[in-house]
């Protein structure tokens, strides 16, 4: 991912928009499943994206104090967008979300290079990059599990209830 042609303001606005979109995506996905454990994981991911948004907004406000955070409808920065349709299987949504998380990880790693090494912003953006990979792994495990259930068209409502 080459971000060298983008200015810092565009990158930060793209990051904020991406976090907002991801939060909404995970909330919509959580409503699309009956699996309570998966719902909880998707809601957790949604909350993580909200925390990232707040931090990136702080960076924006500190670097552009004279400007309000106004998200563009579409950003010039090439980040994947996940579309939800009524008939799309949840496993395909999970796959698309995984691709987004991988791109977000790459994005934050490159964005961190715009800030002095070892600073709070640099370190936090690198941490976000690692967290996005963690999100990828969560989604990957759920996707693999979901594919098995979709293949067999099986769902057990009480599968996660303990003794």
Image: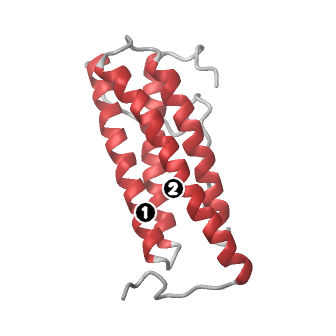
Q: Earlier in the sequence, mark 1 or mark 2?
A: 1
Closer to us: 70 or 13: 13
Measured as percent of width and height from the top left, residue 38 is found at: 47, 69
- At mark 1, the secondary structure is helix
Above or below, 150 relative to 17: below
Measured as percent of width and height from the top left, residue 29 is found at: 51, 65
Specify the label residue 74 is tagged with. none
Q: How crowded is mark 1: few (under 14 residues within 10 Å), some or many (20 or more)?
A: some
What is the quadrant of residue 5 in the picture? top right
Disc 1 to disc 2: CB gap under 8 Å = yes
Above or below, 64 relative to 155: above
Which residue is label 2 attached to? 138
Specify the label residue 41 is tagged with. 1
**Farthest residue, direction right:** 151
Whole-number angstrom distance, CA of label 1 to CA of label 2: 8 Å
Figure disc tally: 2
Give the residue displayed 53% in from the left and 29% down from the top. Answer: 107
Q: How crowded is mark 2: few (under 14 residues within 10 Å), some or many (20 or more)?
A: some
Asked if residue 52 can be seen in this view, the reply is yes
Closer to us: 11 or 112: 112
Left or right side of 55 for 28: right
Give the residue displayed 58% in from the left and 14% down from the top. Answer: 4
Image quadrant holding the C terminus, namely: bottom left
Give the residue displayed 74% in from the left and 77% down from the top. Answer: 151
Left or right side of 62 for 112: right
């Amino acid at each position: 991912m080459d971000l060298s042609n983008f200015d810092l303001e565009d990158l930060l606005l793209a990051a904020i928009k991406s976090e907002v979109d991801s939060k909404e995506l995970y909330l919509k996905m959580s409503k699309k499943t009956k699996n309570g454990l998966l719902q909880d994981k998707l809601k957790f991911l949604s909350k993580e994206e909200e925390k990232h948004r707040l931090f990136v907004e702080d960076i924006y406000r500190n670097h552009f104090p004279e400007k309000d955070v106004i998200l563009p409808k579409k950003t010039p920065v090439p980040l994947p967008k996940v579309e939800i349709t009524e008939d799309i299987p949840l496993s395909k949504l999970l796959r698309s979300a995984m691709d987004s998380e991988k791109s977000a990880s790459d994005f934050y790693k490159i964005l961190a290079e715009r800030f002095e090494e070892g600073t709070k912003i640099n370190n936090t953006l690198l941490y976000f990059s690692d967290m996005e990979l963690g999100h990828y792994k969560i989604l990957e495990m759920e996707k693999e599990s979901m594919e098995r259930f979709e293949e067999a068209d099986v769902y057990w409502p009480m599968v996660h209830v303990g003794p």
